[in-house]
Structures are given as structure tokens and as C-alpha cells.
Image: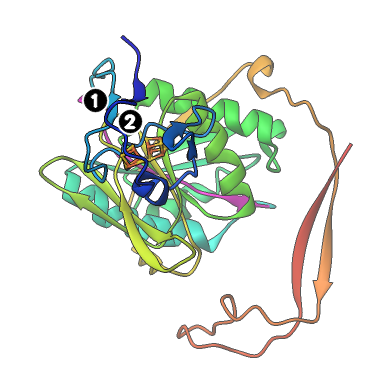
Amino acid sequence: MSSSITIILDKCTGCTLCIKKCPFGAIHMASKKAVIDMAKCTLCGACVEPCKFQAIELNKEAGEKKDLSSYKDVWIFCEQKKGVIQSISFELLGEGKKLAKKLGVKLCAVILGHDIESKIEELSSRGADKIYLVDHQALKSYQDDPYTEVLTKLAREYKPEVILCGATTIGRSLVSRVAVKIDAGLTADCTGLDIDEKERLLLQTRPAFGGNIMATIITPNHRPQMATVRHKVMKEAEIHKGHKAEVIRKTYPESVLKTRTTLLDIVEEIEETVNLAELRDDKGACKGDKRRGRGFARYG
Ligand code: SF4
Ligand code: SF4
């Protein structure tokens, strides 16, 4: 049986209360009875309880219960530009370490690029227990198709419990594609993360309803639990020189790395504006450098 929602016309008094309770604007009145627009209804159930006349009947399909027990480890997608690991990755490694500790699993860094062997030491020193490294010319700069295919393949093979990614232009573009492919839950733009240790759930907190409330979102029925995290919200992982991570090098055939676009050039734009988030001295205090480069990719 598939899920369905029905208005029981005999019981509906036309009080209109359900219209106010539907967050998706899916209910209207016709001939003094509530009518649900199934093109808008998400079957969220928010209208059922407020109806004092039990005029709304929601039947939700139980759905096939997935075996989630084989999913392990916290993965951090480490974004690199021109071979430089972006600072958001270190923030995520710092936060990921705490989450991995609570779950009793390993913290893993995932890095895609070209000539990136030298990044192993940097990621190890930031606390990664394992590094998944895919090195290929086609991955030198971010492109949607090969990055999506590679991360999808890695996730399917190694089954991480959690995948975190920066809420950057690249991160948002990449993980939304991956989440759809692997049928995972994804919460965008999180500002807080924690673990429900009993249920092994990632608690993903983010502003909701125009920033008026903070919502904590969970993904109980799907794995991995995926989230993008805003820049400069979390503290960077401390550097521990000498910490060694296990490295898993993966290679993929050209068919996996092909792209529908051609990257012609990456153009640096010099701005006369100050990015307050990035301006810090060695002690973490703001400094006053006014010129800053911003990258643009031109595709053909
Ligand atoms: S709240 Fe119930 S009774 Fe009122 S209009 Fe909606 S369905 Fe009808
Ligand atoms: S189930 Fe949710 S989306 Fe559908 S009509 Fe009720 S409140 Fe609106």
C-alpha cells in the first residue's frame, strides 16, 4: 500500500484550521470543505492532529527498513583549490573528531585532486585516522561530474555513517548530487552538530523559518547522514605533528572521471573588499589586508 491522505467530507465542518497549519500551502477550501492539492502536499502530517473533527486521514507506508549497521566512520570531504586545502576542511576535521569519538569510529578525510600526495601529512596532522585519496588529472580542479561520481563510488564501497562537507559553492554543489545518488539524508548549512549516542544519530542544527528558530534535524532511516557546515562556525582541528593516518589510494577508470563540461580557465578576481571571516593573524586575531583573490571557473 502506498501513502495517502484523505479529507473525510462528512466530518469536515469547513473550520479552515488545517489551512493555517499546513506549512506547504497545500490546503484550500471548496464548497466549504477542505481540499488537499496533492501536487503540493508532502504528507508531513502537520494538519492531521489540529483537525478537531478527525476529518483528515493520513496513511503512511511503513517503507522498507534498511540495515544501517554496516555504516561506519565519520568522513570529511576536504576541499582543495589549486592544491591548497581550504580552511573549512580543518574546521570540519576538528568537529568530526568529536563526533567520531562519541560514535566510537574513525575520522576519515576524503581528498580528490591531482599531485596531492603531499597533502597526506597535512591531513594526518589535523587528526585524520584514515585518508581516502583519489589522484587524477581529471580531478585537479572541481568539476561536478567526476567529483560526484568518485565520491558516490567511495561512499557506496566504504559506507560511512556520516559525511560532512563545507557549505561552500563546491560543497553545496557536490554533496547534494551525491546525496541523491546514494539515497541519503542531507541537511544544508548547519551551524551545530552533535551525536545522539543512544540512537547513533547525527543532530544537525541549522537556522530555519527565515532564521527565527534553530531546528535540529535527524536522519533516522538513511545512511550516510550528510550535512554541509557553514564556514568559520567551528574551531579548526589542532595540529599534531607526527600523527599518522592510514591511506587508502583509489583509482577509477576514465568512464567514471568523464565530464560533460570543459574547464577552460580559472580566473582570479582581485577585490578591494575585506573578508572579515578570513582575516586573521597567527594568533587568530583579525588583521587588515584589504586585497583578496576570488576564483571564477569558466566552462566551455
Ligand atoms: S481542520 Fe478539519 S474540519 Fe476544519 S476544515 Fe480542515 S479538515 Fe475540515
Ligand atoms: S499532510 Fe502536510 S503538506 Fe499535506 S496537507 Fe497536511 S499539512 Fe499540508
Disc 1 residue type (three-letter): Leu
Disc 2 residue type (three-letter): Arg
Q: Position of residue 138 (x, y in %)?
A: 71, 31
Q: Residue at x 35, y 33 (%)?
A: 224
Answer few, some or many: residues within 10 Å of disc 1's Cα (few below 14, many 20 plus, some between 14 and 19): some
Q: Residue at x 56, y 76 (%)?
A: 277
Q: Is residue 79 magenta?
A: yes
Answer few, some or many: residues within 10 Å of disc 2's Cα (few below 14, many 20 plus, some between 14 and 19): many
Q: Residue at x 69, y 17 (%)?
A: 254
**What is the span of residues highlighted in magenta in the rendered image?**
69-81
Q: Which mark is residue 68?
A: 1
Quadrant occupied by the N terminus: top left
User: Which of 247 and 289 lies nearest the eye of the viewer?
Assistant: 289
Task: Name the quadrant containing residue 208.
Answer: bottom left
User: Which of 146 and 11 lies nearest the eye of the viewer?
Assistant: 11
Q: Position of residue 187 (x, y in %)?
A: 42, 46
Q: Residue furthest top?
A: 1
Q: Is residue 266 magenta?
A: no
Quadrant occupied by the C terminus: top right
Q: Position of residue 38 (x, y in %)?
A: 49, 27
Q: Which mark is residue 159?
A: none
Report whether residue 129 is seen: yes
Q: Secondary structure at mark 1?
A: loop
Mark 1 in CB contact with mark 2 (< 8 angstroms): yes
Which residue does the numbered mark 2 point to in the structure image?
223
Q: Is 222 situated left or right of 199 in this image?
A: right
Q: Residue furthest left?
A: 198
Earlier in the chain: of badge 1 and badge 2, it is: 1
Report whether residue 241 is seen: no
Task: Name the quadrant containing residue 184.
Answer: top left
Q: Residue at x 58, y 25 (%)?
A: 149
Q: Mark 1 to mark 2: distance in Å?
A: 6 Å
